[in-house]
Image (cartoon, grey):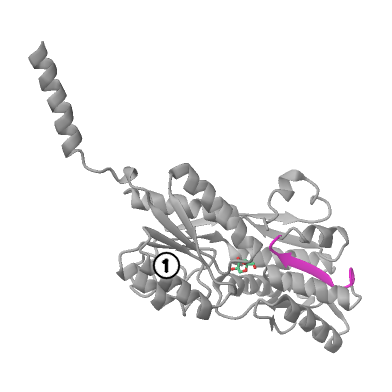
Amino acid sequence: KKIVAALAALAICAVALVKPALAQDKKFTIALIPGLTTDGFYITMRKGAQAAADALGVTLVFQGAPDFNPVTQVPVLDAVIAKKPDAILIAPTDKVQLVEPLRKAHDAGIPVITVDTFIGSGVYQTGAGEADFPLSYIASDNILGGEIAARALAKAIGDKGKVYVSNVKPGISTTDQREEGFKKEMAANHPGVTVLETQFNDNDANKAASQLQAVFARNPDLVGVFGANLFSALGAANGVQQAGQTGTVKVVAFDAPTSIVDNINTGLVDVAIAQHPAEIGYFGVVSAYAHLTGQSIPVAIGTGFTIMDKANIADPNISKYLYSE
Ligand code: T6T
């Protein structure tokens, strides 16, 4: 009996000695690089990412620049690559300018997943070899978002009159696609609506507010504006208020910071289109983890929208999609 027990104990020790370190035993570090750090959208995304990291025992590093700009984002990316995380989740601030900086991560063997925004055409893993190396793109459907915005604004203005898009700057996949979807829907289904030239505000709400007033001064018959992201929308709404046009110039806002509640309740903003950034962060971390532990992952994951207006903003099932601060 003793011999059998001793042999069994030996066998267990031998198994323990030769047992390979399972991938799951390793504590992975996943870096999340947002478009900018001081934006409720990315703060909410970080929360979702942290929830997944906690559930999976992953260390999440959140590192970003204070403004939405490739010039400040690329050095952050370089610093993150130097620390060799197991994977990088990033919202690239430009479709073209982030391709080569991100290729450095890929060449260093660090898997890259883009969240919110994309590089190249946003279609990855095609074998084309251009900017298709990220493993996955996790985001809202921004063309659809632009179409929803157009329908909401057309409805608010009785399907006729002059409107324009307040946008960030060309080259950002998300806001480019929102403008594209908006213009496509207006052209196809709202012939009574004239879309004036887009105003680019560099993600500066103050600039968006003064642009609103300038456009209104040139076009006193302006009836609506689509703010294509959080700062564009806040700024455009402030501009409408400063011009004394609350309720006359209708505002459709992309994104849902907490301040949007007041703006909806006072009638300054007609509709806000909330994205689901917490889901983007959550599925970003889950996808990176799945890849790191040998699973295959979808090349694209789409998250939804919640449409907020005066009639539903008090409903907790709606207001839970307001962004964190
Ligand atoms: O609208 C979001 C994000 O989707 C976009 O890419 C950049 O702007 C926001 O972060 C809002 O400020």
Identify the element where label 1 is drawn: helix
**Taking the image as drawn, is residue 49 in sight?**
yes
Ligand 1: which quarter?
Answer: bottom right
Q: Residues within 10 Å of mark 1 (few under 14, many from 20)?
A: many
Residue 230 in the image: state x and y as whole percent: 69, 67
Please state which of residues 257 and 305 is positioned toward the viewer in this rendering: 257
Between 81 and 151, the residue placed more toward the observer is: 81
Query: Whole-percent x and y of residue 258?
Result: 74, 58
**The residue stretch that appears in magenta:** 246-256
Determine which residue is flagged by label 1. Answer: 80
Residue appearing at x 75%, y 70% in the figure: 234
Residue drawn at 30 percent across, 64 percent down: 109
Q: Residue at x 49, y 69 (%)?
A: 118
Judged from this view, the residue extending furthest toward the bottom is: 218
Please report the residue visible at 74 percent of the width from the left and 66 percent of the height from the top: 253
Residue furthest to the top: 1
Residue 26 position within the rendered picture, expressed as x and y whole percent measured from the top left = 33, 47
Position of the N terminus, as image quadrant, is: top left
Horizontal side of 225 relative to 174 (left or right) equals right
- Looking at the image, the residue that sits furthest to the right is 244
What is the quadrant of residue 238 in the picture?
bottom right
How many numbered dots are placed on residues in this image?
1
Going by the numbered disc 1, the residue's amino acid type is Val
